[in-house]
Image (spheres, rainbow, N blue to C red):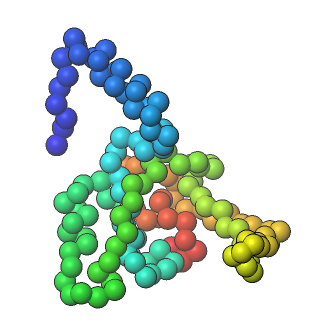
Amino acid sequence: ASGALVPISNLSEVAAVVRELAARVPQWNMDGCHNVWIVKPAGKSRGRGIQCFNAFADIVKYTQIREATQDDKYIVQKYIENPLIIHRRKFDIRQWVLVTDWNPLTIYFYDTCYVRFCASDYTLEDLSIYSHLSNNSI
């Protein structure tokens, strides 16, 4: 569905609203305008069942509850549409830590971390897991 047309006389008002939003919303530059959401099944690991959607109806269809089980619980988050990329690939950084106490908080950092890259180039034209998830098992 396309958005409503804005008369040219109202463009300066629209521009002012956009500037105000950018000033007030700290993650304005990361959110993007494709309305992409990431849906993660609760209680799973290694990227199993994770999907990206840009339509509310698709999210509802994917998360339809069939029976009341752990598999029917989901986390839905706004997707960062403008992530940092290296050579056109999205990535994440894994850093191992050991917490030995909460009070006082005592944390040990392993001195080596590693970077995981997605299998395909990053694009919002294709919401495939291969360009959006950097899990080892993908």
Quadrant of the image for the N terminus? top left
Whole-percent x, y for residue 59 in the image:
26, 64
Residue visible at 44% across and 48% down? 81
Q: Position of residue 33 (x, y in %)?
A: 36, 41
| Location of residue 3 with respect to 73 vertically, above or below | above
Residue positioned 39% across, 32% down in the render: 21
- What residue is drawn where x is 59% and y is 58%? 91
| Front-lying residue, 55 or 68 | 68
**In the image, what residue occupies the spot 75% across and 67% down?**
113
Q: Is residue 112 above or below residue 72?
A: above
> Is 75 left or right of 109, judged from the image as shown?
left
Confirm whether residue 123 shows in the render: no
Residue 37 at what x, y percent from top left?
36, 57
Asked if residue 62 shows in the view, the reply is yes
Check the image and name the residue furthest to the right.
111
Residue 54 x/y as whole percent: 30, 53
135 with respect to 25 (left or right): right
Q: Residue furthest top?
A: 9
**Which picture quadrant has residue 62?**
bottom left
Question: Is 135 displayed left or right of 18 in the figure?
Answer: right
Quarter of the rendering containing residue 8: top left
* Quadrant hosting residue 31: top left
Rendered position, 26 above or below 37: above
Please tell me whether residue 68 is drawn above or below residue 94 in the rendered image: below
